[in-house]
Amino acid sequence: MIPQKVILDVDTGSDDAVAIISAVLCEELDVIGIIASFGNQALEYTLPNTLRVVEMLGRDVPVYKGFGVPLAHDLLPGSRINANPRVMEKEIDGKMVSIHERRLPLPGPTIHEQKEHAIPWLIRTLRETREKITLIPVGPMTNVAHAMRMDPSIKENIKEIVLMGGGVQIHNVTMASEINFYNDPEAAKIVLNSGVPVTVVSLDATHSSWFGYEEAERIRAINNPAADFAANMLKHRIDTALQVGVRKTPKSALHDVLAVCAAIDKSILTDLRHEKCDVDIGRSIADGALIVDTRDTETPALPTYIAYKADGKKLLDMLCSHLSRY
Amino acid sequence: MEQTLKKRRVILDVDTGSDDAVAIMSAILSGELDVLGICCVHGNLPIEYTTDNTLRVVQLLGANVPVFRGCGFPLVMDLTPGRRVNAGEVHVDHIVDGKVMAVHEKALPLPAPTIHEEKEHACSWMFRTLMESEEPITLIPVGAMTNIATVLRMDPRVCSHIDEIICMGGGIDVHNRAYRSETNFYNDPEAAKIMINSGVKITVVGLDATHSSWFGYEEVEKLRAIKNPAADFAAEMLYHRIYAANLTGARKEPKSALHDVLAVCAAIDPTVLEDVRHQKCDVDISGGIADGALMVSSRFCHSVPTLPTYIAYHGNGDKLFSMLCSHLSKYKKPV
């Protein structure tokens, strides 16, 4: 089996960390590089966190520093006043509790990011590749969107984009939006309208395959540092979501892991629909929202596929199988 | 006198373009600037044409200056095409005898290029060149500010490698493309806003300055009298600009500003700009009638500039013209 060449784009991030581990350890993917983006936290935290995870795995995967700011939405900060975003952290007993810690509980990093900026590297790599590459962006779509707009010819060498972002019935950061799309609505819009095949691993799919403490213990039972860390991340996510008050159920979705596993095996997405969709960039309450056109008159003109449901059992099996390869 | 001054190292960013073409010639022939490279951007024309036209001009000069293809789209402006409905946009193309008469022709009347653009993307090259440079470099963007904004946002550390940005764009009391907007800023309002707010020293060579130093048919003849291919071509560009602007109804006076040349000459001799004011300014990106407009704060108590943004209100036309003539007269036939 020749592994599929992929590029991860991450804002590490608790679930990003597990997604990186899954992608790097699995045998089906050849991770040729990881791009760090702003998102769950500022780039100054997501970049070292990404390096920490790669260092723990001891693999020689290059990490590139990407954009620390969105395409343009931050230029009018006041426009967000209508969207009423929810904060995913809370101060409890003088300590900041966050679903995505600024510093992942791992040593280092002692390894460094590449000298080249992510964007020149991404453009150069896609221009020069002989085989098509799959992109797996699981943070804001800023780097991918920027690169596609800077040089549209690179689209020809993208096999597909399997992204984590958006939500049709389920949202998190605002009443209409998921955080990756919300963090750069224009970038998400560019990616969906690019003409490249896009699989949208939405909150609907990730929440349909979420895990609880029982799954955390099954992961821990694999008994290696990668599995321990993944179990800790899952437990941390369940605990903090309850503490911060963003969820009542003791469950948490490992969103980004589902995107990685979907890039390996699409059948993990059990309800995948070819639909006409777009992203709102109107700066009102739907800013950054994934909008699906359900009017009977509309048919999808672009290869955009939205995942509504996923097989949680398969996801856990795949993750455990990857982790056991550490 | 011994020449001890080091040449100012500059990167041009162009959307060639009739006045861009003359600006490139001025920058390269002057001998007073070290033109490290020319980046092309969308603007007056789509990126394919601006890159091709830039190569034509560089080829005419036989100059060994690398040309890079940059961004062909604005950052985000085109994602909502309807936002422009309110801006009172003018289209200046005009058909005469079945031929489209535009201020910026798709293909400049020069031989098709046999030289090639560099392989690297303009933004990749500009970013790398700036980051690797120990002494700061001056950027002279005279098209849409897309490449510049992209590079500025790739990594904020790049700002400390920029000496100054001398841009052609914006207008305070003079506008061209829309009610309140000049073409370069209008073509990518978000990019112009990012640049103005970057914290880098910016000199804005706006329409107020360029229109105060415009030229007519008399200057066309003076350029022609220099009698070399570069001067002939510059004369032809100026003639075409005056003629096309009158014909399309964009202007009544038989005059035309060589906007981008003023920005280049300001990099050589800042005194070509007169009435340069340190002012608090910004660019509107609202999608209303002021979309892409350069706004200067004129409120009594709230106008203290916090950023190094300098706006030129006047250009010295005599000085500009004599600089241009002096540059063009240095043309040497390529071997």
Image (cartoon, coloured by chain):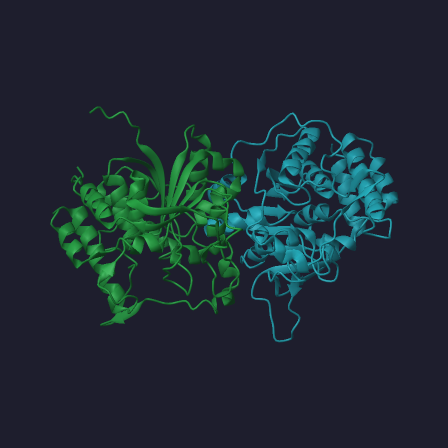
Chain colours: A cyan, B green
Locate residue A317, reporting x and y percent.
79, 44
Vertical position of residue B293 compared to residue B26: above or below: below
Nearest the viewer among B278 and B92 is B278
Q: Extreme front residue here?
A: B300
Quadrant of the drawing holding the N terminus of chain A: top right
Going by the image, does B52 lie left or right of A3? left
Residue depicted at 76% across the width and 46% down the height: A254
Residue depicted at 65% across the width and 56% down the height: A80
Going by the image, does B33 lie left or right of A308? left
Nearest the viewer among A230 and A102 is A102
Going by the image, does A196 lie left or right of B88? right
Nearest the viewer among B60 and B281 is B281
Q: Is residue A276 visible?
A: yes
Locate residue B300, reporting x and y percent.
50, 53
Q: Is residue B49 visible?
A: no
Quadrant of the drawing holding the C terminus of chain A: top right
Vertical position of residue A205 compared to residue B275: above or below: below
Going by the image, does A198 lie left or right of B133? right
Count the labels in the image.
Answer: 0
Q: Extreme right residue here?
A: A214
- Give the image quarter of residue A218: top right
Nearest the viewer among B216 and A84 is B216
Locate residue B231, reporting x and y percent.
17, 48
Locate residue A281, reporting x and y percent.
60, 60
- Give the image quarter of residue A66: top right
